[in-house]
Image (cartoon, rainbow, N blue to C red):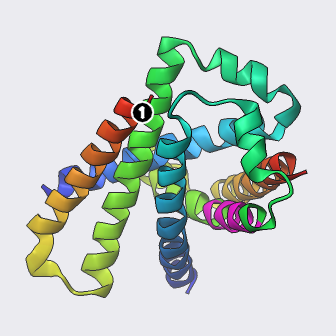
Amino acid sequence: MSRWLARVHRISGIALAIFLPLHFWALGNALQLESFLAWTEQPLVKAGEWAVVVALAAHLAGGLRVLAIEFLDWHEWQKSLAAIAAATTLAVGLALALAL
Amino acid sequence: MTQTLLWLAQRITAVILAVCVVVHLATIIYAVQGGLTAAEILGRTRGNTAWLAFYSLFVFAAAIHAPIGLRPVLGEWLRWRGASREAFLILFSVMLLATGMRAALAVFA
């Protein structure tokens, strides 16, 4: 379980590191923001956006789990922390899917 | 020594980012309702020093956190170690900081 969570944490982190320069580049061109946002209306781009936000939620939840284990000594809580991390990711994913 | 410093920097920035990401996710879910428009985004951020301060801190923490996180990935998965890896990561950090601050200022000004 924790090996699987570590893998999700790593892959979501890599995805975010690749996405960040693109995100900053797009926002840096604020004058062309409207045409960029029109481009993001495409279904495939929307799906990509959703995946990035879910990766962000997963990385946050997985990171809080790591911090709790390292600093709060919550080792006996490992399974609960894993469940909380998965639930948080799912909740954000659903909330965004409904909002999009 | 370097390992300890990197570990510490990664945890400190993680705590900062945890707060920033919760705010960011809440903003995203609130803002995408009814579709995103440039006017709506800029209406929120233009001239707002609180958002500028928030995004500056967010960018700064991410520019430290992402390269430190990529470091073991490059080492373990690509077997990339040594001075060239460190140089690449420093460059990546500077690039994130520069483009991130450019973005934060672009939606503020």
What amino acid is at disc 1?
Ala
In this rendering, is residue B32 above or below B3? Answer: above
Position of A92 with respect to A31 (left or right) is left
Q: Residue A58 placed where, x, y %?
A: 34, 50
Q: Residue B6 placed where, x, y %?
A: 55, 76
- Nearest the viewer among A84 and A66 is A84
Q: Residue at 44% across / 22% down in the picture? A: A47
Figure label count: 1
| Quadrant in which residue B85 is drawn | bottom right
Q: Residue A67 placed where, x, y %?
A: 34, 75
- Give the residues in magenta: B53-62
| Quadrant in which residue A94 is drawn | top left
Q: Residues within 10 Å of mark 1 (few under 14, many from 20)?
A: some
Q: Chain under label 1?
A: A
In this rendering, is residue A98 above or below A83? Answer: above
Tell me the chief SS of the magenta region: helix
Q: Residue at 39% across / 54% down in the picture? A: A59
Q: Which residue is mark 1?
A: A99
Residue B66 falls inside the magenta stretch: no
Position of B5 with respect to B38 (left or right) is left
Position of A49 with respect to A5 (left or right) is right
| Quadrant in which residue A68 is drawn | bottom left
Q: Residue B49 placed where, x, y %?
A: 81, 66
